[in-house]
Amino acid sequence: MFSTETIAALSVGGVLAILIPVIAVIVFKKKNPDSWLPSVVIGAGTFIVFAMVLEQILHVIMLPIVKDNIIMYSVYGALAAGVFEETGRFVVYKTMMKKHYTTKNAVLMGLGHGGCEAIIALGITLFTFLVLAVMTNAIGLDKVLEMTAGGNPEVTETAKSQLESIREYNFISVAMGIYERIVAMTFHVCMSVFVYKAVTQKGKILLYPAAVLLHALLDFPAAMYQAKAITSIAVVYVIMTVFVALIVISTVIMAKKMPDNGELR
């Protein structure tokens, strides 16, 4: 049986993971009525195509090769995300957003990209866990395992292990997940501005590979945690927070030095 706290935490977390990106877009659009709202959809589409489709295809090939080496696994995981997602932004700026070059639209694109990631990676995941938890409480663990595993012993053990891990969710763990997504969404906004400036400002093309590198550096501690080289998730969050705070400061300074009326490449 799943506790009331677990079910409540999954419910609240799932709702917040969807509401926070939506509210962020609404607030920004209200304060900047001249911004181009389709930038949000384009940003979300960029994440889906480049991170969830193209990057995953490469993972099928590369992960079996690097999985047994902690350093290679961590470096690959971090670089792959940076290369695919920042290249996605670069391609979109050169094509779909070519007639809508403004920093405000770059921010909206970043909110769409990071917001889509938050909704899919956290919101949908938490709601899936919620459904499994409610089903287990309603019909029992054996019935759920029978429905999900179909009698396969190996699949049954995997499903049972996953259900056990859901029991550990509470308001603190869900709050940490929400916090991580907010930090990640903030980072995506900054990288959208970085790549936008790389595309539109003469002589600033190196901001694109810089964005790739910064993205890789942000993801590297998380990759090390997944590889169990870092054992404390709190350490990962502290590194992420400090790193993104510095990126935000750098992005604000850069945006002020490179206004939208600057010379385009």
Image (cartoon, helix red, strand yellow):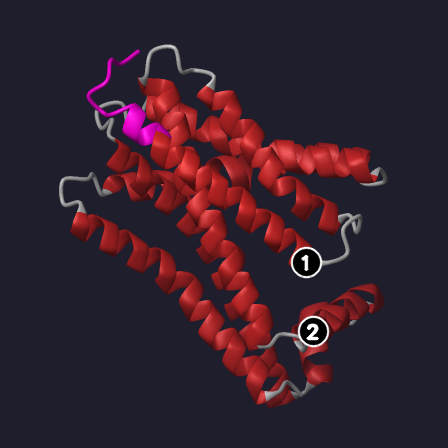
Secondary structure mostly taken by the magenta-highlighted segment of the chain: loop
Q: Position of residue 215 (x, y in %)?
A: 55, 35
Q: Position of residue 143 (x, y in %)?
A: 69, 82
Determine which residue is flagged by label 1.
233
- On screen, 68 above or below 91? below
Q: Nearer the viewer, residue 257 or 21?
A: 257
Q: Which of the two discs, 2 and 1, labels the residue nearer the N terminus?
A: 2
Q: Is residue 43 visible?
A: yes
Q: Residue at x 52, y 24 (%)?
A: 210
Q: Position of residue 88 (x, y in %)?
A: 45, 30
Q: Is residue 103 left or right of residue 208?
A: left
- On screen, 256 above or below 40? above
Tag 2: residue type? Leu
The tag on residue 165 is none
Determine which residue is flagged by label 2.
163
Q: Residue at x 76, y 38 (%)?
A: 73
Q: Residue at x 31, y 55 (%)?
A: 24
In magenta, the rendered stretch is 254-265
Tag 1: residue type? Ile
Neighbours of disc 1 within 10 Å: few (<14), some (14-19), many (20+): some
